[in-house]
Image: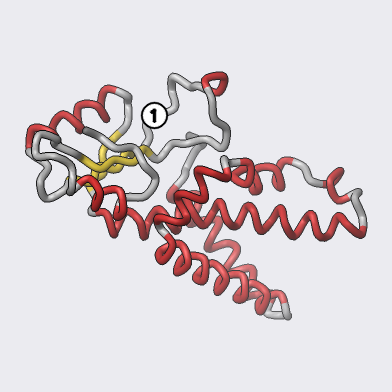
Amino acid sequence: MLDLGSTKSEIMAAMETLPAACDPVGGHPMCGKEVAGLQHADAALYHGATFVLAPLARTSPAALQLAHAVVAAVGAHALLLDAARHDRLAAATSHVPYLVACALMSAASAAAVDDDALWQLAASGFRDTSRLAASSVNMMLDILRTNRAPVRAALLAQRDQIDRLAGLLEGDEAALAQFLQSMRSERSRHFPSPR
């Protein structure tokens, strides 16, 4: 049994209570979209994607080997993580970006109350940055509910970065330029070309 949920700790705790005949493995393919349904199916969705595998203490070597085979068959590459580590990292890279996209939409909506021409200026950069706000609310509520503490910690870390940027905008242009260049280089290092 391979689960595909976006959080692991609660799901894997429940999987521990399954009958002995079950041989569960936690999993999370890191390649979702903000849209759902068959009309949005993509045969190449998993190609080159990271697919987290999180074996339980009770997971047999045979089940883990089969999970690795499934991951390879869909064109992804496996990354073994324990549940807590997965949830902490997914909070920072998936769950908080959703909340940041929602905050961006909220701030823009509030600004548009005074001038709705804002939406005419919201071009590709805004659309790319806010894309995750279009995700299923029901799905995201489940994710946030089952990963509350790591998401809150990552969200507060995000707030610290925004506060830092606000401080740099107060006048330390050299430090601001250094920060922006550093983050540009960091992104290029981790994502050298579009997936």
Q: Residue at x 70, y 46 (%)?
A: 125
Specify the quadrant of the image occupied by residue 43. top left
Q: How many marks?
A: 1
Q: Is residue 147 left or right of residue 122?
A: left
Q: Residues within 10 Å of mark 1 (few under 14, many from 20)?
A: many
Q: Residue at x 39, y 45 (%)?
A: 6
Residue type at mark 1: give it. Tyr
Q: Residue at x 40, y 53 (%)?
A: 90
Q: Secondary structure at mark 1?
A: loop
Q: Is residue 30 above or below residue 111?
A: above
Q: Dividing the image into 4 quarters, which one contains the N terminus?
A: top left
- Residue 164's x, y, as percent? 60, 75
Q: Is residue 55 left or right of residue 149?
A: left
Q: On the image, numbered disc 1 is attached to which residue?
A: 46
Residue closest to the eye, 127 or 155: 155
Q: Residue at x 24, y 53 (%)?
A: 13
- Residue 45's x, y, as percent? 44, 27
Q: Is residue 12 above or below residue 156?
A: above
